[in-house]
Amino acid sequence: MSERFETHEHDVLVIGAGGAGLRAAIEALGQGASVGVVSKSLLGKAHTVMAEGGIAAAMANVDSADGWKPHFRDTMRGGKLLNNWRMAQLHAQEAPERVKELEQWGALFDRTEDGRILQRAFGGHTFRRLCHVGDRTGLEMIRTLQDRGVYMGFDVYMECTIVRLLTDGGRCAGALAYWRETGRFVVFKAKSVVMATGGIGKAWPITSNSWEYTGDGMALAYEAGAELMDMEFVQFHPTGMVWPPGVQGILVTEAVRGEGGILRNKSGERFMERYDPKRMELSTRDVVARSIYTEVKEGRGTEHGGAYLDISHQPAEYVKKKLPSMYHQFKELADVDITKGPMEVGPTCHYMMGGIRVEAETAQSSLPGLFAAGEAAAGLHGANRLGGNSLSDLLVFGRRAGLAAAQHAKEVSAPNLDEGQISAGESEALSAFQRQGGENPYAVHRDLQKVMQSLVGIFRTGEDMQKALSELAKLKERAAHTSVEGSRMFNPGWHMAIELKSMLTVSEAVTRSALVRQESRGAHSRIDFPELSPEWGKKNNIVWHDGSAMGLRQETRPEMRAELKEILAEDQ
């Protein structure tokens, strides 16, 4: 044990207190494991709260023809068949059960006339499938899971940042962290670790993601020896706020379109007729985001470089009841009454389909003892995620990760902690204090965001991404020479210096993967390779740390089972 630092020991350490982390913690507790949950910010501040529209689950409460098979088919087609098909199958089959469980634990949902959970339409879903609470579904989910977890008794370590995963003989053994308030280090010893840290949106300047989303979990796993997968697939949500500048990127839920919202350009044309005449506004997110981007690029955008999204043709009371958060958000932040006029929206970096590579059944990464779930894990969503699938994803695979982590903890002996790793982690974390007269980490972060927005954004070219790689190399060099002043207490510049390393790692992984994938598929759009390639449709990009540099290889995906192929071949 580390004598120098405060140390906590658990069977299962969960990193991240969003939906996936909380669901994993609840499951592990149910197995009798001792569970610690580490949260970079405060409990309840999780990004799951931003998921407003609903939880996709084929409950068939509104459309009786729905079932797991159409849900599986929609998910695979939305992901352009690059999904881990076994994850897509488990997700579609288990989601209704997970929603019922949430209801038993006290979650409130909007109801049908006969008292069942109401479901709404969403882009890419054949049936009305999203179980919701107005447009505050994620908030209700977090409230329910937190209450459950606190009641069951997990230990919570809030405002605590992990800087390094610890390993013991090729397996995960815990983590080194620091308290954000005091800057003091703390060591966690654990037989199993569940990574549930969400996405990477803060590497882009216009994002719906909040400050926590710096790709820490993926970077930590990568540094510890786990593989990452599908890193080129970054989803730009078609509708974020574009005005005023202070709120740029804040999410405008897809539920606005699900409830009948219409997109128009500055001339008042309903432009989705041009891009997807069949599904219009309820096309998949990659298509709608590219359509808005194209309208703006070709000079048909609105005043502030977006498109108009209008729901004011619906009765005012209906809008306020169905979309209470959106009504208040626009009223307070943009001084717009959405019951009377249109919202101005544009694409915003929203979700990461790629992440830590995991096994479908157990959510275990390629590093024994390290599990991952939710947005930090890859596989389920393929090349593009359907709206609503993230909330059911974190319930289904959060549960599976917690279960497998607890079982793993029962089977292995307590790990040994390596003082050398702890000391190395400590000195690396403190290095910015040792350097004098270096650059401000915020300046490097701002330039990183510019590079990612302009060179690795919604549309990509080989030339741009080659340029991005050389820019990233320079930024990495600059980041290694940043310096911070003052003490370790409440020092945001220091936190940024640490997070910068994670953002540079994931940005490089995104760029390298996107450069070699010479096709357009889902959220990855190449101007120089606009078509789908049958060859690339069979492959996933795998990224790993080969000691000194970033390794990249392709792996052919396993053949899908015959009965699942039949489901896919059926017409809607």
Image (spheres, rainbow, N blue to C red):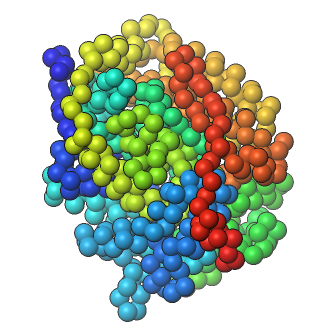
Label tally: 0
Q: Position of residue 262 (x, y in %)?
A: 67, 73
- Is any atom of residue 496 visible in this view? no
Camera-side residue of 112 and 74: 74
Toward the bottom, the furthest residue is: 114
What's the residue at 56%, 40% (across, down)? 229
Looking at the image, is 489 positioned above or below residue 517? above
- Is any atom of residue 221 visible in this view? yes
Camera-side residue of 315 and 119: 119
Q: Position of residue 530 (x, y in %)?
A: 82, 49
In the rendered view of the protein, which quadrant contains the N terminus? top left
What's the residue at 15%, 17% (across, down)? 3
Looking at the image, is 305 positioned above or below residue 107? above
Q: Position of residue 179 (x, y in %)?
A: 26, 30
In the rendered view of the protein, which quadrant contains the C terminus? bottom right
Camera-side residue of 561 and 429: 561
Q: Quadrant of residue 505?
A: top right
What's the residue at 58%, 15% (across, down)? 477
Looking at the image, is 549 positioned above or below residue 90? above
Q: Position of residue 557 (x, y in %)?
A: 62, 47
Direction from residue 481 to residue 234 in the image, left or right: right
What's the residue at 63%, 54% (across, down)? 559
